Amino acid sequence: MVTNQASMKRNGIQDWVSLRATAVIIALYSFYLTFVFFTSPALTYEIWQGIFASLFMKVFTFATLVSIMLHVRIGLWQVLTDYIKPTGLRAGIQYVLNLIAFAYVAVGLFVLWGV
């Protein structure tokens, strides 16, 4: 089998690895926040702001936001490819949903670095 290594197309292995990698980041973030919730006696605004003021938490949250966006993009592409057959309609829906995913990351970034 001859493959073009310079191709811009995704393949199944790349999607599979990307989904697993982003899922690990999302899971680690979820476990960390769960740990923070259960180990803090009371979560006041000041404590919550202090948690998110650290550089570690800002970078970890941003990495998680990007991971969620990539995870959603790949998942939506797979689902839409399976269930929406007209190419133009599928491309339009993917475009709108990708814009929404990007907007969520952009808003999250502004909120996160505004703390």
Image (cartoon, grey):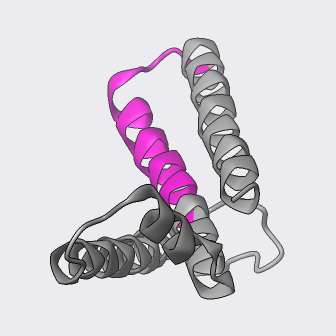
**Of 73 and 28, the residue lying toward us:** 28
Say which residue appears at 30% left-offset and 71% top-offset.
Answer: 30
Q: Is residue 81 above or below residue 54?
A: above
Left or right of residue 77, residue 24 in this image: left
Position in image of residue 53 (x %, y %): 64, 73
Position in image of residue 87 (x %, y %): 59, 20
Quarter occupied by residue 58: bottom right
One can see residue 85 in this view? yes
Q: Quick one: quadrant of the C terminus?
A: bottom right
Position in image of residue 13 (x %, y %): 46, 76
Say which residue appears at 20% left-offset and 84% top-offset.
Answer: 39
Quarter occupied by residue 96: top right
User: In terms of secondary structure, what is the magenta stretch mainly?
Assistant: helix
**Of 48 and 57, the residue lying toward us:** 48
Say which residue appears at 62% left-offset and 30% top-offset.
Answer: 100
Say which residue appears at 69% left-offset and 31% top-offset.
Answer: 99
Whether the magenta-drawn stretch holds residue 71 is answered as yes
**Of 17 and 82, the residue lying toward us:** 17
Q: Is residue 49 above or below residue 55?
A: above
One can see residue 12 in this view? no
Q: Which residues are magenta?
A: 67-87
